[in-house]
Image (tube, grey):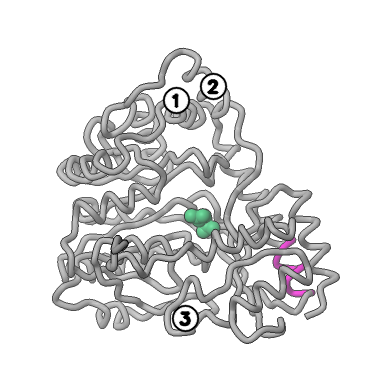
Amino acid sequence: MTLRTSEHMAFLRQSEIRNMTIECTKVRGINLAQGVCDTELPEPVRLGAAEAMAQGTNIYTRYDGLGELRRAIARKVERDNGAHVDPEAEVVVTSGATGAFYAACLALFDPGDAVVLFEPYYGYHVDTLRALSLTPSLVQLQAPNWSFAPEQLRAAIGPKTRAIVINTPGNPSGKVFSRSELEGIAEIARAHDLYVITDEIYEYFLYDGHEHVSFASLPGMRERTVTVGGFSKTFSITGWRIGYLLASSELCYKIGHAHDLVYVCAPAPLQIGVARGLDALPPSFYEELKTEYTRKREKLCSALERAGISPHVPSGAYYVLADSRRISGNTPKERALSLLERSGVAAVPGSAFFEGGRGDDLLRFSYAKRESELDEACRRLDSFRP
Ligand code: GLN
């Protein structure tokens, strides 16, 4: 047989995030690798979806999603993101934030175009670009604050560059881009006439008084911005695949059709569940998320500190990058496996988020876990001897 598979896609491996989940299951460990977010989902979300299914919302939706959800998203955006969007034309409901990002890249760019990303990056962003024959161009954020100089960003832009990708709060660094950093990016995007795709899925996971600034709310940025968001994390429904994007009506039309091509639509009854959640949950729900996750962050970071796996304490999202140098093993993967074997706690090798060996001394831990499981993970870290 001479059948072969795509040479172009040969770069794509099972993500290290999923690999570690598989390794973790083998030893029945505690999975702090994949940001699975297996906490309880809010009741209005669960009941809303069940009711919608029972009442017959089970067929294709419009290519850009159900009106009830688009309107609920527009109200949320007005309330929390400082922007007014038309639910009839400027919102597309997507198959998760990942589907939104893929559809946006499919609709906006041509093979050979370049896109700027900040490192550490979320691997799915980079692999999506590669799948579409786009070239990722990296700007290295400097620990401990994950800061960057505007000159670094300018230097990453070449004649083929079409866009800058922002992820705030960021996976895996937990960086929350400040308003002035975003203003700096806006100035550069304007000067080089670039799109900005901003993945804001962790917008409600903020600590130490950090403020979430939506890039599209900056003066003059709306027309060049595609905002990507979703409900996986906020409502603990990572498997539902309900996300969205916001952009100008022209872009929504094009990106919406690209999304239709790949996904047709996001699951119909689950869209209703999310809409009901958005309408029913009071501001205190979002405040409590912050309190809960601040507590979980402290718990995990102190356990890591005690175990000699020194954490970079995040400002947002729910991941911690931590120093793995005291753990035995020659490669980042060996260190992740050694930690798993000796403590029963799974983390992702830092190499999954960096190029050129820059993350080799790091491991990424997620604390989007039920309290009891996180407690058990911390106990295991306490008795771990590197
Ligand atoms: N966003 C989650 C993480 O970074 C899940 C990723 C995935 O499994 N695709 O862990």
Query: Within 10 angstroms of label 3, few (less than 14), some, or many (20 or more) residues?
Result: few
Q: Which disc number belongs to residue 50?
A: 2
Q: How many marks?
A: 3
Quadrant where the C terminus is found in the figure:
bottom right
Vertically, is 72 above or below 220?
Answer: above
Query: Within 10 angstroms of label 1, few (less than 14), some, or many (20 or more) residues?
Result: many
Could you tell me how far apart the alpha carbons at marks 2 and 3 are, in whole angstroms? 46 Å
Query: Within 10 angstroms of label 2, few (less than 14), some, or many (20 or more) residues?
Result: some
Residue flagged by tag 2: what amino acid is it?
Ala
Residue furthest to the top in view is 55
Left or right: residue 104 versus residue 23 is: left
Q: Which disc number belongs to residue 379?
A: none
Residue flagged by tag 1: what amino acid is it?
Pro
Residue flagged by tag 3: what amino acid is it?
Gln
> Label 3 belongs to which residue?
142
Quadrant where the N terminus is found in the figure:
bottom left
Q: Decide if residue 318 is in sight here.
A: yes
Comes first in the chain, label 2 or label 1: 2
| Whole-percent x, y for residue 157 in the image | 22, 77
Residue furthest to the front in view is 1
| Whole-percent x, y for residue 26 in the image | 69, 58
**Kind of element beneath mark 3:** loop
Q: Decide if residue 177 is in sight here.
A: no
> Badges 2 and 1: C-beta atoms under 8 Å apart?
yes
> Label 1 belongs to which residue?
269
- Residue at 32% x, 31% y is 65
**Kind of element beneath mark 1:** helix
In the image, residue 381 lies in the stretch drawn in magenta: no
Left or right: residue 291 versus residue 217 is: right
Relative depth, front residue between 66 and 78: 66
Range of magenta residues: 299-306
- Residue at 63% x, 65% y is 365
